[in-house]
Amino acid sequence: MNEKNIEPVLPTFPDNSLEAEEILDHMGRSFRQRLKREDALRWFKVKFKENKAIGLTFVGDPHLGSNSCNIDLLRQDVKIMAETEGVSCVNLGDTVDGWGGRLIRLYAENDVSRETEQKLAKWFLEDAEVPWRVWLMGNHDAMGDFNVYLKAINAEKIPMLDWQARFKVCFPNKTEIKIDCAHNHKGTSIYNPLHGQKRAALWNEHADIYIAGHHHNWGITIEELEDGRVVNLARARGYKWHDSFSTTHGFNTKLYGASIMFVIDPNEVVPTRRVKPFADLAEGAEYLKWKRQIGNRS
């Protein structure tokens, strides 16, 4: 008997993945889609339907959940942002502490859990009625994957970007204000809290406003550069007050500039009149109301 005739017939199994060429095709489509998204994010437009002044407010690091978060001030500012007609808001990042990695031990300094921080973050995004237009993710948001959580519950599809956004505020009369905002811009100086923003104004693409958070200090500068551009440089202080890091490193607690409002009037031609910054949201809101009333009468 031929021994080959008694050998069993074994099954042939399909590969557990696609062929290399098919994988490359998929990777190519994925790369092209990613590139398409990156191109769309570069100077995307936030369009307003009327030629009325707006109060573009950049919200400094909230650090919700931290024992050091100045809740009274935050709620006061949230009320202004939610109830003032014409206000639009940008979150500069670090919505929560979100401690992760080797810093997870710092949760022991707080009275809140990760679950509680998630609840507070959801309140800030959805329930506080803040008119969000852009939302940045800072380093603390990424530590505990809060960036993933926030993007998942972003029902209004507010543009949520990691670290930095460059966009244009556009009006029907063709006025465009370019914004370069980041959780932080590159570059520091002990002599100038706005060193990173000045560096961005000199070396990044041209914008009208350069603003960041992150450092828990604040400052505002309006400057005419050598090329004739008038630029607004700012840093928002945020809402985290006396924390152990600032204490041990000798940083003084700043009292003002937690969030910065820029009142933008598209009907003004002179740059110094078109964009006005305010370190006090209450004052900015009053100026905004006046500007919008003037616009209604004209």
Image (cartoon, rainbow, N blue to C red):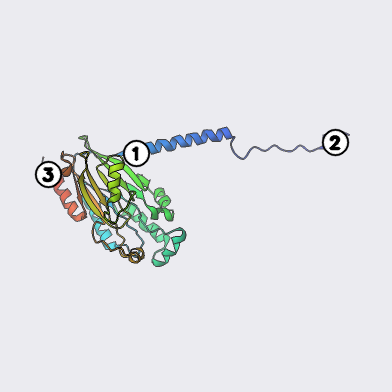
The C terminus, quarter of image: top left
Kindly indicate whether the residue at mark 1 contacts the one at mark 2 (C-beta within 8 angstroms).
no
User: How far across and down, in percent of the image, does residue 120 sit?
Assistant: 36, 58
Observer-nearest of 104 and 282: 104
User: Depth-wise, is mark 2 or mark 1 nearer the camera?
Assistant: 1
- Amino acid residing under circle 2: Glu
For residue 188, the mark is: none
Q: Position of residue 237 (x, y in %)?
A: 28, 56
Mark 1 and mark 3: Cα distance apart in space? 34 Å
Give the class, few, some or many, for how many residues have Cα within 10 Å of label 3's Cα (few <14, many ≥20): few
Q: Which element is circle 1 on?
A: strand
* Residue denoted by label 1: 42
Where is 89 relative to 62, above or below?
A: above
In the rendered image, the vertical position of residue 58 relative to residue 52, given as above or below: below
For label 1, count other residues whose C-alpha is less than 10 Å away and answer few (under 14), some (14-19) or many (20+): few
* Residue 256 falls left or right of residue 140: left
Residue 232 visible in this rendered orientation of the protein: yes
Q: CA distance from mark 2 to mark 1?
A: 70 Å
Foreground disc of the pair 1, 3:
1
Whole-number angstrom distance, CA of label 2 to CA of label 3: 101 Å
- 194 or 113, which lies in front? 194
When the figure is inspected, residue 43 is found, relative to residue 98, above or below; the finding is above
**Residue that appears at 24% across and 42% down:** 208
Q: Name the residue that disc number 3 marks.
A: 294
Left or right: residue 181 versus residue 102 is left
Asked where in the image residue 274 lies, by quadrant, the reply is top left
Query: Which element is circle 2 on?
Result: helix
Q: Three-letter amino acid code at disc 3?
A: Ile
Residue furthest toward the left? 297
Discs 1, 3 touching: Cβ within 8 Å: no
Q: Residue at x 47, y 37 (%)?
A: 30
Label drawn at residue 3: 2
